[in-house]
Image (cartoon, rainbow, N blue to C red):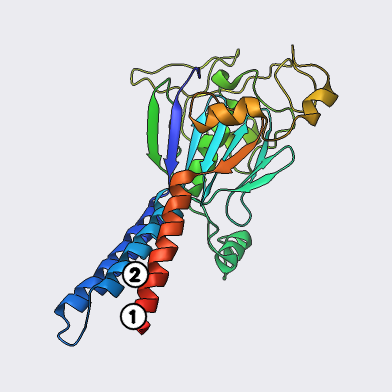
Amino acid sequence: MDQGPRYVLRNRSQVLKGILLIIFGAALVLITVFDEVAGSLVPPGMAALGLAGIAASIFLMPRVILRPDGVETHNWIFRVWVPWNHYRELDTKFGMYIVSSDHKDVVASYPGAGGLSKGREELGAKHKLGKSAPNSPGLPLHTDGTVVHWADMSQAIGLIENVYEHEYVEGKRSKRHKPAPGTRASRGGLGEAFGQATGGASGQATRGASGEVPGGPSEDPSRQDEFGPRAGEGSAADWDAQPASAASGVGAAAFGHEFPTQRTKIVDVASAAAMIAGVGCLAVGIVLSMS
């Protein structure tokens, strides 16, 4: 069982887009109701249901879950688990991608801002065509329980790096990790980037009265890593030869009982059902409206 908190990261702007799409579908039904010339309510009703299903799958359901054992992403149709000993870095050049030892998985809840916007950020605020990247306050760490955060991309990046560097992930980290640029982990500091107090020389966290814990990195040379054998798990060749969908991890993870030991990707039944139903209802509504 995980020792430590569980963070659920949701993107407010994405959820807002989903709500607007649902409102648009409801507006189609209302327009038909008040239109004296309009016929049956079935076509707009089916279209509205379809838009609601698509909005749920694309905008409302995607989220990121951080655990002491790894990071879990709920994307469109699929769920992906990446344990910390397979986690390499976050690629945020065009959206957010979790890079593991041999995969690169998109994080659907944090899409890219677009090439033009990203290019302006790369130019910097001093350039006449540039703009500064958003500077959001950092999210605090906690000792236990489930914590839900409405986080923008910069906050999500910072929290992922902070959780990775915290003491309750000790012994589970990858030696090949590359900290995300701009985070406190990339600078080797602990508190200045997000306004949190640093730990002592030993790297121990200091608990406040509120239960929040400013985390600190731990450099345990014996920590797990995907490029070498771990105690009791055979040789490095045996470790690398294990399939990404090892049966020991997939079945347990699918029901939420245990985090998989390797990067694992499965179908998210709820998201897939919402997408299929949404596309089907929308198609039926369009066909009925044209007949």
Q: Residue furthest bottom?
A: 37
User: Camera-side residue: 86 or 53?
Assistant: 53
- Mark 2 vs mark 1, foreground winner is 1
| Residue depicted at 80% across the width and 16% down the height | 234
| Residue depicted at 55% across the width and 19% down the height | 168
- Which mark is first along the chain, 1 or 2? 2
Image position, residue 265 (x, y; %): 61, 41
Say which residue label 1 marks. 289
Q: Is residue 131 left or right of residue 24?
A: right
Asked if residue 79 is positioned above or below residue 115 in the image, the reply reads above
Image position, residue 83 (x, y; %): 62, 30
Asked if residue 121 is positioned above or below residue 258 in the image, the reply reads below
Question: 10 Å neighbourhood of mark 2: few (<14), some, or many (≥20)?
Answer: many
Residue 190 visible (yes or no): no
Q: Secondary structure at mark 1?
A: helix
Asked if residue 226 is positioned above or below residue 160 in the image, the reply reads above
Three-letter amino acid code at the position of disc 2: Ala
Image position, residue 19 (x, y; %): 32, 58
Question: 10 Å neighbourhood of mark 1: few (<14), some, or many (≥20)?
Answer: some
Image position, residue 56 (x, y; %): 39, 54
Mark 2 and mark 1 in contact? Answer it, CB < 8 Å: yes
Q: Secondary structure at mark 2?
A: helix
Q: Is residue 98 left or right of residue 22?
A: right
User: Camera-side residue: 130 or 256?
Assistant: 256
Question: Residue 47 bears which disc, if any?
Answer: 2
Three-letter amino acid code at the position of disc 1: Ser
Q: Quadrant of residue 36?
A: bottom left
Question: Residue 244 bears which disc, if any?
Answer: none
| Residue depicted at 55% across the width and 26% down the height | 252
Q: Where the C terminus falls, by quadrant?
A: bottom left
